[in-house]
Amino acid sequence: MGKVYLKTYFYVEHEIKFLIMNLMEAYNHIDKFIICECNRTHTGQPREFIFEEHRDKFPQELMDKVVYLPCDISEHTVEAYENEDAIHAINEPVMRSFFMNLMNFDDDDIVISIDADEIIYREAYDYILKETKETGLVRLNLHQFFYKTTYLWEGKDFVSPIAAKYKVFRHNYPCNWRDVGPILSKKVGCHFSWCMTPKEMVHKLHTYSHPQYRFCADEELLENAIKNKEYPFNPDEEFNIRELENDSEVLPECLRSQSQYLEKVLV
């Protein structure tokens, strides 16, 4: 029987909170939590490795399952600030797949591939692993949140993360570890998208993989959008936000039971 790996990558400080949440939820269900950090942004700009500065914020009793991979991708990416095609065809696949060069997997190992802000429920792992063992590859279905970890975007599913047997994915799909496979019918977690300050949003808009949204890179515009529960990236898209209570069962267990800890260590 193969091992189970949860794999993610991150590149901004506010995502540390989500890494901790994923570790808390996954710890009893995985063999290792692979955290990849690249020295280039989606747009090919240089960045420093910052994980070690925040290691002491993690629950130390859970760190035995963390595998931190600093990924030097400088020779494999291109400067692509205005070139969305290069971002998606070159830089992003490198960022998502470089871990394969640094780890030794067996064919029957299962890799669950998520972004840092995609939190998998602890109670969903048995279901995910059962389906993955049967089919070889599944796409995860998450609740979509926006702006705040209590702002649920109703009627919006998020289905980009995947779980796959290593041999199935490695031999059959482009190495972006994303957006392929049959979608699970049950919701298995939460995508906490753009849950950051307006200043952090502006930084993200200048460094991440969708330059078409940079017209929103204005702190005042974004602050008003959060306040008024508006979606400035596409005003024509239906954007229905329902604010949940902090103890809502839609939220991951760690967020309901460990919110004070998370707030304390991330001040």
Image: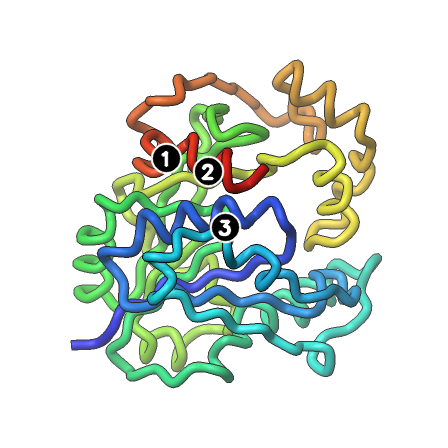
The crowding category of the residue bearing disc 3, from other C-alpha atoms within 10 Å (few below 14, some 14 to 19, many at least 20), is some
Q: Secondary structure at mark 2?
A: helix
Q: Mark 1 highlights which residue?
A: 258
165 sits to left or right of 118:
left
Which of the numbered marks, if any, corresponds to residue 98? none
Which residue type carries mark 3? Lys
Image coords of residue 70 (percent x, y)? 58, 73
Image coords of residue 5 (percent x, y)? 33, 67
38 and 171: which is toward the camera? 38
Which of the numbered marks, if any, corresponds to residue 57? 3
CB atoms of marks 1 and 2 within 8 Å: yes
199 sits to left or right of 109:
right
Please tell me which of labels 3 and 1 falls first in the chain: 3
135 sits to left or right of 45:
left
Q: Mark 2 highlights which residue?
A: 262
Which residue type carries mark 2? Leu
The quarter of the picture where the N terminus appears is bottom left
CB atoms of marks 3 and 2 within 8 Å: no
The residue lying at 73 percent from left, 78 percent from top is 74
Marks 3 and 2, how far apart in space?
A: 9 Å
Q: Secondary structure at mark 1?
A: loop
